[in-house]
Each structure stands twice: as structure tokens, then as C-alpha cells.
Image (cartoon, rainbow, N blue to C red):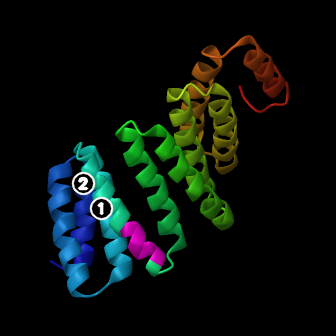
Amino acid sequence: MKLEELLTAARSEFSSGSYEEARRKYVEASKIAEKENDKRMLCIILGETGLTLSKLGKVREALNANEHAYKIAVEEKLKYSQAALLSNIGLNHAEQGMLEMAMSYYNRSLPLFKEMKHHSALAWTKYLIASAAIDLGNQATAIDALLESIAAYRKIGNEEKEKMAVKKLANAYFDSDVETLTDMHIHQEAGLCW
């Protein structure tokens, strides 16, 4: 099978939830990319392998794949891949309960996404920041990140993700103190939520 065919097959397996089969195909594809010295493609494959390994619960292996892909992305100056991989590495840390480390990686990805004006990735990364902040008990950071996430999802017209972020925002407010609830009223009046 050619590299593109393998990658398409791996993505199809991933989409259908056949993660182990997707992993096998990604491993095979990575061997071809290495043999062809196609670093850009290897970076993409390793990043997608990392996502697949996360789905399989192999977080340490996922982290290794994402870190390897990130090194390639930096060497090859692949800005979007760098940002996405920083976010994925953060997610790997969050999956291991290392939330402050996760936040550090998420925050490193934000300037790159902002520079590229990639609103969808910005919204998702802000959502990840909020999730980690909630788990760390930092409701104020979570609320700020969720308001930004909601605004970005609204800007690009992704109603499903916007609703997901609004639900998390409601929970963050519910778990907050009275001062934060007053802030919610201010945001509501400003049209930033609900």
C-alpha cells in the first residue's frame, strides 16, 4: 500500500473506533515515511498515532509519539503542527493528572494558533484550559477561558461545540462563589453567554 492509502485507511479505522487497527496502519505508514525521508508526513502520522494511542489508553506511548512529532515540527518549521502537538502533549499530561503541566503546554500553543488566526483550534485549546482549571479548582481562569472559547465557536458558527462550552461554563459558575456569579450577570448583560 502507498503512504497516502495507508494514512487514509488509518484515519478511516480511527473514525470508526477501530483504534488498534488504526494504530497498526499508522505504524506501517510511519515506516514508509521514514524510509522516504518525508519528515512532514512523518510528523502528521506521529501526531495522529499519538491521538490513537490516547484512545487506546496508552498515554505514555501517546506522549512519546507527540513529543517526537513536535521535535520534527520544530525542525521543519511546521507552525500549525507545532501548535497542535503542544496542545496534544498538554492533553497527554492532563490524562496523567499532571494538570499544571498540561496548562503550560496549552498556553504555549495559544500564541501560535492566534498568529495563524485558527479560531477553531483556539476555541478548543481554551476549552482544554478551562477543563484543567476546573480540575485545579481555579474557577475564575476556567470561566475566562470558556467565555473566550464560546466567543470563538460562535464566530466560526460551530453551535455544537459552543453548546458544549456553555454547559461547562454553567457548571463552572455553579461551582463558583457569589462574586463569580455577579460576574456571570455582567457577562450575561454584555451578551457574552446564554
Q: Magenta residues? A: 69-74
The amino acid at mark 1 is Ala
The amino acid at mark 2 is Glu
Distance between the alpha carbons at the discs numbered 2 and 1: 6 Å
Magenta stretch holds residue 11: no
Left or right: residue 4 versus residue 110 is: left
Left or right: residue 194 versus residue 99 is: right
Q: Which mark is residue 61?
A: 2
Q: Position of residue 100 (x, y in %)?
A: 50, 41
Q: Residue at x 51, y 35 (%)?
A: 132
Q: Position of residue 134 (x, y in %)?
A: 55, 28
The quarter of the picture where residue 69 lies is: bottom left
Mark 1: few/some/many CA within 10 Å (<14, 14-19, 20+)? many
Seen in the picture, residue 12 relative to 167 is either above or below; the reply is below
Quadrant, the N terminus: bottom left
Q: Which mark is residue 33?
A: none
Q: Residue at x 49, y 67 (%)?
A: 82
Tags 2 and 1 touching, CB below 8 Å: yes
Q: Residue furthest top?
A: 178
Quadrant, the C terminus: top right
Q: Residue furthest bottom?
A: 36
On the image, numbered disc 1 is attached to which residue?
A: 65
Check disc 1 and report its element: helix, strand or loop: helix
The answer to which of 121 and 14 lies nearer the viewer is 121
Q: Residue at x 30, y 62 (%)?
A: 65
Magenta stretch holds residue 73: yes
Seen in the picture, residue 150 relative to 185 is either above or below; the reply is below
